[in-house]
Image (cartoon, rainbow, N blue to C red):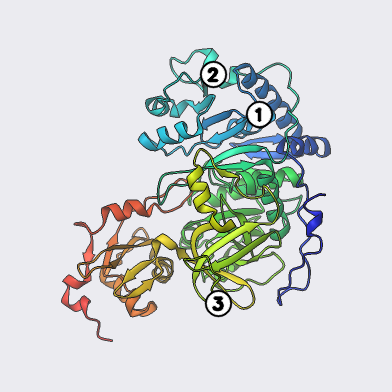
């Protein structure tokens, strides 16, 4: 029986909305059959807007059929891994669908990886074929020692690269037919960010992408006349599962940017005619703290979704003339929590659990805590293959994350009596200071209320009194003369006494992954250094008058 049909009786019992959520469609499609469907239903509609190109569904299907023929000729077979080291481009998207057309697995690598990190993910994926961009070729070949001879193709012109190694030459005259791939078979390996440890390869099925896209379509209210804009890399779920595949299922357009740029963002939105965009990390903060312009609301966007949603979101909505929605998820969990497009946003909440998932807030023994209490967020899906299948090549890590039949997110959260879920912070980022547990996330929120603070990361650093002290790493608006003392005064105004940082460091930029996630381990490695201001060393700052 179709898994979606089993959910037809499930209703959303929220007191805030009386309607039920319809079951997710197309769950038995693979990406191959989804593309065939789209090219049949909407052959001439624009599927992809990327690097100034508009590509229709039928044009895309034909081009990936020819590329799949070339990859097959290079020896790529069903179940093989194709590793790509490519920036956002049409060619990058084509490698994904061409690999899947053969029943192979696409493994896009973070293009900022270097050295050991790059070598490790390639060794972990154990690919049968490699593709990289020409401008990344020198970096790539320096680090790809795999211990065996793996064919390498180059996308674009590169010096001293023979024609046989060029991706553009790796096509056949006639498109080959798609393999008969089941929804449960693997489509891709997406590597975790590695912000708290070594990157892991999340093995994702075809249904993973179809179901996650279905959640976005249903809960965000996406439409077939939308243009979905994503400025984040194709090695991330936002650009793939939540932008490209919703467009594939709806018959609308996916506009993929090169990468997020505050100075180009609204120009790219207008140029592509984007009606929906996604955000993450500091995206909204950076856009909000840019100087206001009289035409800020003169843009085509009706909806933005992502995480986190700050408390000043209503101001952003009024300024830019759009609606903001929040969700909660990860590459492993899909998106088990959403704020529906037809439901009012609850301040501080990322939404409610959707019918296809179970979610509890648990203590260290995996026992559910009382409503309103903080604990780790544990999730599990009710439909097979809608979350990650495993950490590829990491059996122990897979079992550890899924102990007691729950996926352990490592995130702290709470759920109120109405079922609204709130993200509190990363479990590993909780700071223990003089007997108090401090949420780094909540301290960051408070500091970001200052109009001259663009970004902020809060970490725990070793204390001479045992446990930890709080350090705030702050990026301020260009041209601002905001001082550390003024930041401290602001913290005392908006935070509890126990949350006020002892250490403050003003930085030009925070270390981040290409998807905007903070690399806090690098800040922890720096710790308290010569650039760090210690309020305990300044008598007037150490002891507030209040």
**Is the residue 100 above or below the residue 531 in the image?**
above
Q: Mark 3 points at which residue?
A: 370
Q: Mark 2 points at which residue?
A: 166
**Image coordinates for residue 28, horizontal then vertical, percent:** 77, 44
Of the numbered discs 2 and 1, the one sitting upstream in the chain is: 1
Of the numbered discs 3 and 1, the one sitting upstream in the chain is: 1
Figure disc tally: 3
Q: Which residue is rendered at x = 71% and y = 25% of the image?
A: 65
Q: In which quarter of the image is the C terminus?
A: bottom left
- Report the Cα–Cα distance between label 2 and label 1: 16 Å
> What label sits on residue 98 in the rendered view?
1
Q: Which residue is rendered at x = 75% and y = 45% of the image?
A: 249
- Report the Cα–Cα distance between label 3 and label 1: 49 Å
* Residue in the foreground of this view, choosing between 142 and 321: 142
User: Which element is circle 2 on?
Assistant: loop
Q: Which residue is rendered at x = 60% and y = 68% of the image?
A: 318
Does any portion of residue 295 appear in the rendered image?
A: no
**Image coordinates for residue 269, horizontal then vertical, percent:** 60, 50
């Amino acid at each position: 029986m179709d898994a979606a049909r089993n959910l037809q009786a499930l209703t959303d019992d929220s007191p805030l909305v009386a309607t039920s959520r319809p079951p997710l469609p197309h769950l038995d499609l693979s990406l191959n059959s989804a593309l065939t469907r789209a090219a049949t239903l909407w052959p001439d509609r624009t599927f992809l807007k990327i690097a100034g190109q508009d590509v229709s569904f039928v044009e895309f299907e034909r081009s990936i059929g020819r590329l799949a023929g070339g990859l097959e000729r290079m020896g790529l077979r069903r179940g093989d891994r194709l590793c790509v080291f490519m920036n956002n481009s049409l060619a990058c998207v084509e490698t994904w669908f061409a690999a899947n057309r053969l029943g192979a697995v696409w493994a896009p690598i973070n293009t900022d990886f270097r050295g050991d990190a790059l070598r490790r993910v390639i060794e972990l994926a154990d690919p049968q074929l490699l593709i990289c961009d020409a401008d990344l070729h020198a970096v790539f070949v320096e680090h790809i020692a795999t211990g065996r001879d793996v064919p390498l193709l180059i996308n674009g012109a590169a010096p001293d690269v023979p024609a046989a190694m060029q991706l553009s030459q790796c096509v056949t005259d006639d498109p080959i037919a798609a393999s008969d791939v089941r929804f449960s078979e693997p489509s891709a390996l997406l590597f975790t960010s590695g912000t708290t440890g070594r990157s892991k390869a999340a093995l994702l099925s075809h249904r993973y992408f179809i179901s996650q896209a279905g959640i976005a379509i249903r809960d965000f209210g996406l439409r077939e006349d939308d243009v979905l804009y994503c400025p984040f890399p194709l090695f991330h779920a936002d650009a793939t599962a939540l932008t490209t595949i919703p467009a594939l299922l709806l018959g609308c357009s996916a506009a993929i940017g090169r990468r997020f740029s505050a100075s180009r963002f609204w120009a790219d939105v207008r140029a592509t005619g984007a009606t929906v965009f996604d955000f993450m990390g500091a995206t909204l903060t950076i856009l909000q703290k840019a100087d206001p312009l009289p035409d800020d609301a003169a843009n085509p966007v009706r909806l933005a979704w992502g995480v986190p949603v700050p408390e000043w979101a209503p101001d952003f909505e009024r300024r830019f003339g759009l609606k903001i929605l929040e969700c909660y998820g990860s590459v492993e969990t899909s998106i088990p929590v959403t704020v529906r497009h037809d439901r009012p946003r609850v301040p501080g909440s990322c939404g409610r659990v959707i019918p296809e998932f179970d979610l509890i807030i648990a203590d260290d023994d995996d026992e559910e805590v009382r409503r309103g209490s903080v604990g780790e967020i544990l999730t599990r899906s009710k439909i097979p293959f809608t979350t990650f299948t495993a950490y590829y090549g990491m059996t122990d890590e897979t079992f550890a994350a899924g102990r007691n039949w729950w996926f352990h997110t490592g995130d702290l959260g709470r759920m109120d009596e109405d079922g609204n879920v709130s993200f509190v912070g990363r479990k590993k980022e909780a700071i223990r200071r003089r007997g108090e547990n401090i949420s780094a996330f909540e301290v960051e929120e408070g500091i970001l209320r200052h109009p001259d603070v663009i970004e902020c990361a809060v970490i725990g650093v070793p204390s001479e009194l045992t446990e930890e002290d709080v350090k705030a790493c702050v990026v301020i608006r260009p041209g601002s003369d905001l001082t550390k003392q003024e930041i401290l005064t602001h913290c005392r105004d908006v935070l509890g006494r126990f949350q006020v940082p002892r250490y403050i460091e003003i930085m030009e930029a925070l270390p981040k992954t290409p998807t905007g996630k903070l690399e806090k381990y690098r800040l922890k490695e720096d710790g308290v250094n010569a650039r760090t201001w210690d309020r305990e060393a300044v008598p007037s700052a150490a002891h507030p008058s209040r």
